[in-house]
Image (cartoon, helix red, strand yellow):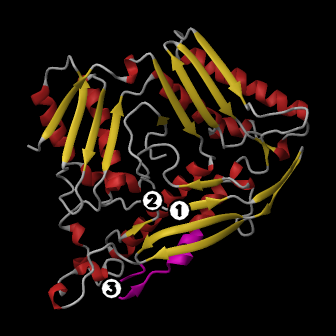
């Protein structure tokens, strides 16, 4: 059995007097960057798996977006200058001497992504794609007679399956930390429920005016909830200021209704929405596309939600940007997903609040984390059973790869 450390604590968010929870909605530039990076990783992994029998080395976790500019008025909105897409990262460009049309594929997948994410834009004219891709491996590529067996030379141009050492010897690519926790608090669940509802297909089909760049910042003091929410509107469907105000009032009613049904024990629910709006000067959250990426804002992988879709500021967290990382052995993705899944399973089996920390050492066995730390309530007594349960869970880490290729796990 692995060396698993169990720590006891009396302090969990579920019993705390206060908490802060943030979520950047699906149309926020940082969330879009995360989603694009993961889209490219999944598509590239599927492509190389289908064509060469293995997922080749890559990472798109440094993808960035630079905002364009737009024309916005009541009843009309369009892009004036394109959104700049920075495809940063590293990628294998060949396998066994056969070239991979990387640029062509990434361009295709990026356009498909934006056509679905921001359907108002013209992907052929409103996107400017910049390629900053490398095929250089990490340090370790020595030259000379002593390094004749070193496959690092062929890391991004493997001569065949034998150059993919991780297939037989899965090793951590980095020294890093993955964390997970369960259960979610009532406030965390409420934040997810509100944003998911407002950005749901069913709601948007009936309310064309709502943009996707919805952002929620929330605070709880005991059973008093306070939320500040930004909700963009799409200019084409908002003819005047009166309609703009009417739409916001509708959103307020919906949010308060969701909150009332979610947790009837809330003593006070205070809601502020679009706090920068100035009706006198028409400084409004009115957009052409529904996202601030159209007007100078930027998005970068890893700056947004953690892999559970939230930024819970008093919870354990990892600063890793999981999206776009290789799903076979990149710790910043696998250990975060594994820790979250293990924590959920601990809660399901033992019904206890808990946190899971997994720490790797670069080059060491992927299935043998350097540190495995579990934080459980002070009153918990079955330490031996818990250690055995978690030890068995860790064997399933390689299975996560297939789930990631099927978009099974929340990553942003």
Q: CA distance from mark 2 to mark 1?
A: 8 Å
The residue that mark 3 highlights is 96
Image coords of residue 70 (percent x, y) = 80, 56
Determine whether 252 is above or below 60 in the image.
Answer: above
Q: Report the span colored magenta.
A: 93-108
Whether pointer 2 and pointer 3 mark residues with C-beta atoms closer than 8 Å, the reply is: no
**Picture quadrant where residue 355 is located:** top left
Q: Nearer the viewer, residue 190 or 396?
A: 190
**Picture quadrant where residue 147 is located:** bottom left
Q: Is residue 119 visible?
A: no
Determine whether 118 is above or below 164 in the image.
Answer: above
Q: Which mark is residue 63?
A: 1
The residue that mark 2 highlights is 324
Whether pointer 2 and pointer 1 mark residues with C-beta atoms closer than 8 Å, the reply is: yes
Q: Earlier in the sequence, mark 3 or mark 1?
A: 1
**The N terminus sits in image quarter:** top left
Q: Counting other residues with Cα less than 10 Å from the Cα at mark 2, is it few (<14), some (14-19), or many (20 or more)?
A: many
């Amino acid at each position: 059995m692995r060396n698993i450390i169990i720590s006891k604590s009396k302090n969990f968010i579920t019993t705390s007097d206060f908490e802060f929870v943030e979520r950047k909605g699906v149309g926020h530039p940082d969330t879009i960057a995360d989603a694009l990076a993961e889209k490219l990783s999944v598509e590239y992994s599927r492509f190389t798996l289908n064509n060469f029998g293995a997922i080749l080395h890559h990472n798109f976790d440094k993808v960035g977006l630079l905002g364009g500019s737009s024309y916005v008025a009541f009843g009309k909105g369009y892009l004036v200058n394109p959104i700049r897409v920075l495809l940063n990262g590293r990628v294998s460009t060949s396998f066994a001497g056969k070239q991979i049309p990387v640029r062509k594929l990434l361009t295709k997948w990026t356009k498909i992504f934006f056509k679905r994410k921001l359907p108002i834009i013209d992907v052929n004219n409103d996107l400017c794609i910049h390629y900053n891709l490398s095929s250089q491996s990490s340090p370790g590529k020595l030259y000379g007679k002593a390094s004749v067996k070193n496959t690092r030379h062929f890391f991004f141009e493997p001569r065949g399956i034998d150059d993919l050492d991780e297939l037989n010897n899965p090793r951590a690519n980095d020294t890093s930390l993955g964390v997970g926790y369960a259960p979610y608090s009532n406030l965390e669940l409420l934040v997810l429920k509100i944003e998911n509802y407002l950005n749901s297909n069913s709601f948007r089909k009936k309310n064309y005016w709502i943009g996707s760049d919805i952002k929620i910042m929330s605070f709880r003091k005991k059973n008093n909830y306070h939320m500040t929410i930004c909700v963009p509107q799409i200019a084409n469907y908002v003819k005047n200021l009166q309609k703009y105000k009417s739409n916001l009032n509708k959103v307020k009613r919906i949010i308060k209704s969701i909150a009332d049904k979610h947790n009837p024990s809330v003593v006070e629910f205070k809601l502020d929405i679009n706090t920068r709006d100035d009706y006198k000067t028409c400084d409004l959250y009115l957009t052409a596309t529904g996202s601030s990426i159209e007007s100078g804002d930027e998005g970068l992988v890893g700056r947004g939600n953690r892999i559970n879709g939230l930024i819970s500021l008093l919870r354990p967290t990892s600063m890793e940007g999981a999206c776009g990382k290789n799903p076979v052995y990149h710790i910043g993705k696998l250990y975060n997903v594994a820790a979250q899944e293990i924590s959920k399973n601990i809660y399901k089996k033992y019904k206890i609040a808990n946190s899971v920390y997994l720490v790797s050492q670069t080059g060491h066995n992927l299935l043998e984390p350097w540190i495995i730390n579990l934080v459980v309530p002070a009153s918990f007594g079955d330490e031996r059973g818990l250690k055995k349960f978690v030890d068995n869970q860790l064997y399933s880490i390689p299975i996560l790869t297939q789930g990631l290729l099927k978009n099974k796990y929340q990553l942003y």
